[in-house]
C-alpha cells in the first residue's frame, strides 16, 4: 500500500515506546520504536501484514479491542 500523502518519517516515537500505523483492514503500514525490538518484533516483518497475521492469538485479542 502506498501512502504518498502521509509523512510517516516525521511521526514522533516516544522514547522506549512504539508507534504503529494501520489501514482500515488493520494491516500494518508503518511501525517504529524501541519497544518492538524489546518485545521480539522485527518491524520489517510486520509491515504489510494484518494484526491477525502478525500477532499471536492471545495478543491479538487484547489489541483488537482498542481498534
Image (cartoon, grey):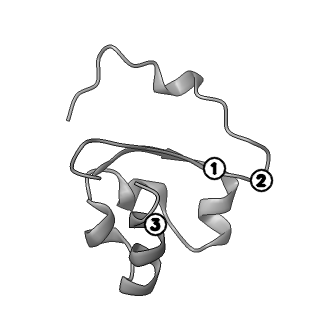
- Real-space CA distance between mark 2 and mark 1, rounded to the nearest whole angstrom: 7 Å
| Looking at the image, residue 57 lies above or below residue 40 | below
Most foreground residue, 44 or 56: 56
Q: In the rendering, which numbered label is found on residue 16? A: 2
Quarter of the N terminus within the rendering:
top left
Rendered location of residue 38, percent (x, y): 68, 69
As helix, strand or loop, the secondary structure at mark 2 comes to loop
- Real-space CA distance between mark 3 and mark 2, rounded to the nearest whole angstrom: 19 Å
| Looking at the image, residue 11 lies above or below residue 24 | above
For marks 3 and 2 on the same chain, the one whose residue lies earlier in the sequence? 2
As helix, strand or loop, the secondary structure at mark 3 comes to helix
Mark 1 lies on residue = 33
Quarter of the C terminus within the rendering:
bottom left
- Cβ atoms at labels 2 and 1 below 8 Å apart: yes
Which residue is painted at 74% across and 42% down in the image?
Answer: 14
Q: Nearer the viewer, mark 3 or mark 2?
A: 3
Q: In the rendering, which numbered label is found on residue 56? A: none
For marks 3 and 1 on the same chain, the one whose residue lies earlier in the sequence? 1
Mark 3 lies on residue = 63
Amino acid at each position: 500500500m502506498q501512502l504518498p500523502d502521509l509523512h510517516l518519517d516525521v511521526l514522533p516515537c516516544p522514547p522506549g515506546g512504539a508507534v504503529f500505523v494501520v489501514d482500515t483492514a488493520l494491516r500494518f503500514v508503518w511501525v517504529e520504536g524501541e519497544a518492538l525490538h524489546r518485545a521480539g518484533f522485527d518491524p520489517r516483518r510486520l509491515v504489510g501484514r494484518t494484526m491477525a497475521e502478525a500477532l499471536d492469538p492471545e495478543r491479538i485479542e487484547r489489541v483488537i479491542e482498542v481498534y
